[in-house]
Structures are given as C-alpha cells and as structure tokens.
Image (cartoon, grey):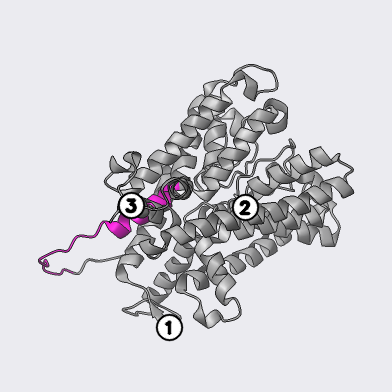
C-alpha cells in the first residue's frame, strides 16, 4: 500500500515548488539564528540584512560575505553557517527524504517525486537507496578531508588539537559543499605555497562538484569508460577540459603580474593557477588576490563561474552538462546534421530544448541583474559583472565590492544566489515534467535566421 505523503509535501502540486520552498525556509531559519545576539562576537544582533545575506550565501553554498566570518561571528554563528552549508550542499529534499525514511521507513509517491527533483535520480524506485548513498558518501568524504586538514594544521602550523580539529572540520564541510566560507580574512591566501591545503581543498571541491550520480557511476565503472552514460562522459570530459584550460589561462595571463603569480616561484605558480581554475566552479576560495587580477582573468573567471559544476552536486552555474550538450548541439547544427549524437547515443530533442532554455535564461538573468547593479552602485562593469556571475553561479569569489553595493545590492545578490542554487535544478525538473501532447500540428513556415 502506498504511503501517504508528509503534510508539508501534500500542499504542493509540483516537486520544484517543494525544493524552492524548502530552500527558502532554510534561509529564513538561518537568518533568524544568525540574527540572535549569541551568534556574534560582540553579543549584539547582526542586523537582518547581514544575517539574511550570510544565511543565503551559506544555504546556497556560495561564500560571498559582508563581514569577516571569524571576527564577526561567534562559534555558535560559525557552526550555524557550517550547518547551513551542509544542508544546502546535500540538498534540502535529500535531507527531508532521509528524515522521512528514518521516521517512517517508507516514502509516499509525492515525497519520492520531490526527492527525485533534487537528486536527479533516473528512477523514482532508486530514490531511497540513492539518498542513503549521498548522505553516507558526503559524510565519509568530509571526514577524510577533515582528518587531512586537521593533521596539517596540527603538524604543519602548530595549532592546538582542538583548534586544528575545528579548522579542519569547518573547512572540510565548506570545501566539499562548495560553500567558500573560511575562518581567515584573506580566504586561503596565506596557504598559497602549501600543496597539502590547496590540493585537499581543490579535490574536495572537485569531488563535491562532480555530482553524486557521476561519482557513483565512476565508482562502479571507472575502469570501463565505454560503459559510462552520456551524463558521466560529458561531466568528466568537460570538467577536465575546463580545469586544464583554466589553469593555462591563469598561468599565461597572470604569470608576470607582480600582485598575483609574479611574486611566486614556478612550481607555486602552477599550484596557484590550478587552484584558481578549480575555485570558480563554485567553491569560492582563493589563494590569489582576486581584486589585483587583470580584467582578462576576471573575464575568464566569469565564464568558469557561469558554467559551474556537475548536475546533482554541490556546485552551481548552468552546469557542465548543459554547457557540454550545448557545444554538441552547436556542432551538429554547424555540420547540418538533423540529429545530435554524443558517442553512440542520440540526444533527445526535448533535452536539447531544455539545454538551450537554461543557457539563454541564465544569460538573460545575468544581463538584467548586471544592469540593475550598475544602476545601484558606482562600480565599473568588470567588477559588477564579476559579482553578479559569482552570485548566480554560487561561486563566492569577489573583486572586493560585496560590502559596498548597499542594502538594495545585497538583496539583489541574495536573490541571485537563491535563483542560482535552485534555478537550473528546478527549471530543468519543471521542463522535464511539463510535457503536453499536442493533438494537431500547424503548417510549417521557414523564417530567416541570422
């Protein structure tokens, strides 16, 4: 017998409504907690704008901040931020599904559909097993990264065990969930020469950003690429290409910049360039001063932030799968082919329309938001565009103007973070489920294009 849906799910007719509402509630709860006097080191309320912005940044795993995390927030506030990042990274509906399983041991149809919208599970019958895998895998990865970072802080920097454990655990959570929050005012710039810190954080961000379906398939068939699905092939291939190209671009562009790579030795330049190539994929940490980069590097970072990471992962952006499939669609059209083929598979026309819709709507949203923020602030186009794309892509990188865009600008960036976190996810689900069979066809007419 089918189990009844939980009351809060029964109010919604579409799973995307559940996901959006759940993320909104999480931001609201985080805002309330961070508004408490106990959440700040000064023992005073942070104010609703700062609390709301920080909560949205944590739940949407972005990392943009208005205040110094360690100096402004108390241990309670920092733990709230880490908790919000954990919930946002795993996905509200993944957590809700887990709680439902723990309480009832079974799922209703509406709950399964809602969880499927969040986890991108191919079949609703796989939701129960996948959610358990996601949670166990996430916690296991965070534990491993926490151990490595704790050991490094303990041995390499002489931190007391308690402090090293706190630093390791906090940054393991924020790096794996692509949240970008750190407990230092300069992000990770002080560790630019430390491969243990840089590579651990980079690997955590890459693994979390690949997407859980891809990670699980790689675990099963990593020795047999021919068995990989189109999702895995595009995600892995595009990720590798973007990481290599990003590293090369930052090396070439910033090599002689005395304020970034120019002051480092050759091996450290390579490490810093690789780290800088990984972080725009949504992780949001930096080992170089972003504000001192050349505008050409900002533009390259804009592109990487807009693309983001893998589907059903902790990263943001329009997703590498969308970008990769868009490239195949363009290539097929340029060659005059009537079908889009990827490997030995054909891409459905419905998926093609979804890809184009998500990409175009993303460009439109960034364009309109950039115009509005330009009107609200005195900053130039380069910096404003960077800030907008960072918020939309939930990347968390900044040229340093986040705190000076004013309350209206902060609200706009918070809305962008919210849309960027749930937008491609909910839009993709809505397009996939919103199918209506037309009972007739209209006459065809050719239109001049271009």
Disc 3 on helix, strand or loop? loop
Visible residue check, residue 77: yes
The residue carrying mark 2 is: 139
Picture quadrant of residue 347: bottom left
The label number, if any, that marks residue 153 in the structure image: none
Q: Earlier in the sequence, mark 3 or mark 1?
A: 3
**Residue 266, position as x, y percentages in the image:** 84, 61
**Rendering coords of residue 226 (x, y %):** 52, 82
- Picture quadrant where residue 402 is located: top right
Circle 1 is placed at which residue position? 344
Residue position marked by numbered label 3 in the rendering: 108
Residue drawn at x 63%, y 65% is 245
Q: Position of residue 85 (x, y in %)?
A: 58, 42
- Observer-nearest of 353 and 265: 353
Question: In this rendering, is residue 433 above or below 46?
Answer: below
Give the camera-side residue of 136 and 89.
136
Tell me if mark 3 has few (under 14), some (14-19) or many (20+) residues whose alpha carbon lies within 10 angstroms of its own: some
Q: Identify the element where label 2 is drawn.
A: helix
Q: Is residue 444 left or right of residue 140?
A: left
Q: In this picture, is 362 found above or below 218?
A: above
**Closer to the camera: disc 2 or disc 3?**
3
Can you say which quadrant of the picture contains the N terminus? Answer: bottom left
Query: Is residue 366 something one can see in this rendering?
Result: no
């Amino acid at each position: 017998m089918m189990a009844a849906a939980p009351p809060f799910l029964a109010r919604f007719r579409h799973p995307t409504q559940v996901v959006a509402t759940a993320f909104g509630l999480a931001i609201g709860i985080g805002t309330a907690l961070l508004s408490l006097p106990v959440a700040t080191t000064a023992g005073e309320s942070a104010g609703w704008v700062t609390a709301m912005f920080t909560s949205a940044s944590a739940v949407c795993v972005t990392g943009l901040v208005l205040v110094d995390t360690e100096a402004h927030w108390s241990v309670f506030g920092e733990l709230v931020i880490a908790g919000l990042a954990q919930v946002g990274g795993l996905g509200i509906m993944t957590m809700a599904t887990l709680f439902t399983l723990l309480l009832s041991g079974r799922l209703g149809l509406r709950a399964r559909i809602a969880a499927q919208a969040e986890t991108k599970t191919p079949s609703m019958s796989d939701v129960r097993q996948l959610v358990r895998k996601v949670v166990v895998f996430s916690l296991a990865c965070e534990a491993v990264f926490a151990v490595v970072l704790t050991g490094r802080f303990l041995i390499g920097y002489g931190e007391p065990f308690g402090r090293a454990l706190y630093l390791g655990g906090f940054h393991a959570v924020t790096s794996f969930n692509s949240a970008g929050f750190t407990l230092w005012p300069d992000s990770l710039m002080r560790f630019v020469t430390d491969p243990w810190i840089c590579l651990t954080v980079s690997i955590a961000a890459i693994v979390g950003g690949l997407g859980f379906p891809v990670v699980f398939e790689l675990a099963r068939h990593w020795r047999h690429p021919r068995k990989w699905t189109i999702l895995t092939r595009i995600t892995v291939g595009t990720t590798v290409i973007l990481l290599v190209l990003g590293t090369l671009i930052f090396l070439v562009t910033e090599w002689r910049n005395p304020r970034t790579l120019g002051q480092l030795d050759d091996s450290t330049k390579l490490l810093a360039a690789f780290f800088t190539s990984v972080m725009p994929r949504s992780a949001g940490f930096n080992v170089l001063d972003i504000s001192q980069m050349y505008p050409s590097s900002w533009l390259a970072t804009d592109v990487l932030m807009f693309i983001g990471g893998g589907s059903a992962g902790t990263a943001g952006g329009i997703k590498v799968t969308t970008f990769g499939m868009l490239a195949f669609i363009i290539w097929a059209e340029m060659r005059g082919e009537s079908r889009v083929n990827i490997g030995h598979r054909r891409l459905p026309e419905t998926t093609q329309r979804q890809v184009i819709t998500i990409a175009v709507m993303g460009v439109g949203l960034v364009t309109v938001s950039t115009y509005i923020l330009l009107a609200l602030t005195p900053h130039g186009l380069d910096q404003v565009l960077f800030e907008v794309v960072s918020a939309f892509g939930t990347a968390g990188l900044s040229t340093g103007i986040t705190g000076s865009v004013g309350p209206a600008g902060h609200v706009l960036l918070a809305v962008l973070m919210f849309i960027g976190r749930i937008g491609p996810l909910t839009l993709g689900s809505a397009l996939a489920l919103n199918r209506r069979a037309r009972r007739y066809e209209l006459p065809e007419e050719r239109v001049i294009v271009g």
